[in-house]
Image: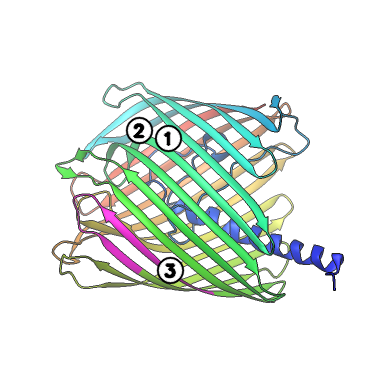
Amino acid sequence: MAPNPHLRALFMLNLRGLVFRFACLVICFWKVSILAQGVLAPPPFDFSGIAPAARTTGTNQPGELPPAVVPASENQPLFQVGPIQMYPHFLYRFLYGDGIPASPGQHINTVINELYPGILLVLGNHWRLDYTPTLRLYSDDRFRDTTDHAVNLTGSTTYENWLVGFSQAYVSSSQPLIETATQTEQQNYATAINATCKLNTKLSIELAANQTFNFVGQQTAGQVLIDSLVWSTMNWLDYQFSPEFSTAIGAGFTYDSLKGSTDMTSEDLQARLIFRPGEKLSISVSDRMEIRQVIISGAPDLITPIFGVSAQYQLFEQTSFSLGANRVVSPSLFLNEITETTSINASVRQRIVKRLFLDLTGGYTKTSYHETFFGFDLSRQDDGTFFNARLSAALLKRGTAAIFYQTNENTSTASGFAFSSTQVGFELGYRF
């Protein structure tokens, strides 16, 4: 008997809804770990192609990437060649900051001019490719002027009852980092493949494989920075109790190959709850137990409870609120060290008038550094806070202008890694 076309349409609609919720979690997860946390106020993702790292909730899943920003459907591309649509975008950013670390213990006041000339290619119905270089010019010659790059390719397709997604990204960055307290060059290659299948009206499975290569290869403050190659997988069995409530259990494995340092493996057992009592409120809670082994070093296994919590609430049509907390363990940029990071953050978005928005974001992060070669003795602990305020306005049809203010402070038990910085600036952007 041929399947009922109405039932098939309903099935595919539910499947896409499930995948959309999963993709939203993926976006949050990726922001945690692609690049180490920077000192400078982050630019908007839709113009820079780089989401701010380590300032949002989620579970550390290397390689999971957000999709490229797709223009509104009614916007016509500036150029089109066959099935390829081209959407150029441009952002200029002016920033003045004090207390920015140029090296451990050396804090500099500087003006920074940034240019983000990028282009988004929409390749048919399934692929998006965004390329955005960043030209960054410092007024103080103790910082190096740089040209960074961000390339993000994403695609998805369906096969029978499966929805399959793929992403590949390359990010080169050279910014002052909190972890190193100096301007640090990084090159990151991240690949992710995920697949979701709805087995019936209640049960579905999610499969994911990730690969992340991060290359640093320099020294700072007398310490060697290391390259890392990370392969991981995370697989879920999801049960939908009702349209408002779902739960899932998952298991994963990660292998960390660290240049010049001892390699590590870890196994994860996770549980996840997603609760959506209405259109205005969404809550996600994840909890997992990670068992991490340091190969050859003779150090004992590190058993760490890890969690992630996020909540979004649309208080009024003009006001939204989000809250997040998470705890993750990952290799450090420093030789023979790992980091254990706990963070809490909150944000409020308020539409003041039709085309004017105010965004307030703040958070606290605690990072402990542990040795891996001689055991897990505490060697460094940082406590950081930040607050960011951004007032933005839509200009013309596709333009935007914004002013921003950020203050962040980091205290550390290690000499030279504490700093306090205040930054102010403005942005002008346009999407063609």
Q: Which residue is mark 2?
A: 98
In the rendered image, residue 386, in percent from the top left (x then y), is placed at 42, 48
Answer few, some or many: residues within 10 Å of disc 3's Cα (few below 14, many 20 plus, some between 14 and 19): some
Tag 2 near tag 1, CB within 8 Å: yes
The three-letter code of the residue at mark 2 reads Asp
Left or right: 323 with respect to 300? right
Q: Earlier in the sequence, mark 3 or mark 2?
A: 2
* Viewer-side residue, 159 vs 293: 159
Report the residue at 42% width, 42% height from top. Answer: 407
Dominant secondary structure of the magenta stretch?
strand
Seen in the picture, residue 310 relative to 227 is either above or below; the reply is below
Magenta highlight on residue 40? no
Q: Earlier in the sequence, mark 1 or mark 3?
A: 3
The three-letter code of the residue at mark 3 reads Gly
Mark linked to residue 252:
3
> Total label count?
3
Disc 3 to disc 2, C-alpha distance: 43 Å
* Viewer-side residue, 25 vs 166: 166
Circle 2 sits in a helix, a strand or a loop, which is it?
Answer: strand
Seen in the picture, residue 306 relative to 115 is either above or below; the reply is below
Magenta segment? 249-266
- For the question of whether residue 346 can be seen, the reply is no
Report the residue at 54% width, 40% height from top. Answer: 45
The three-letter code of the residue at mark 1 reads Gln
Left or right: 111 with respect to 46? left
Q: Which residue is mark 1?
A: 423
Image quadrant containing the C terminus: top right
Disc 1 to disc 3, C-alpha distance: 40 Å
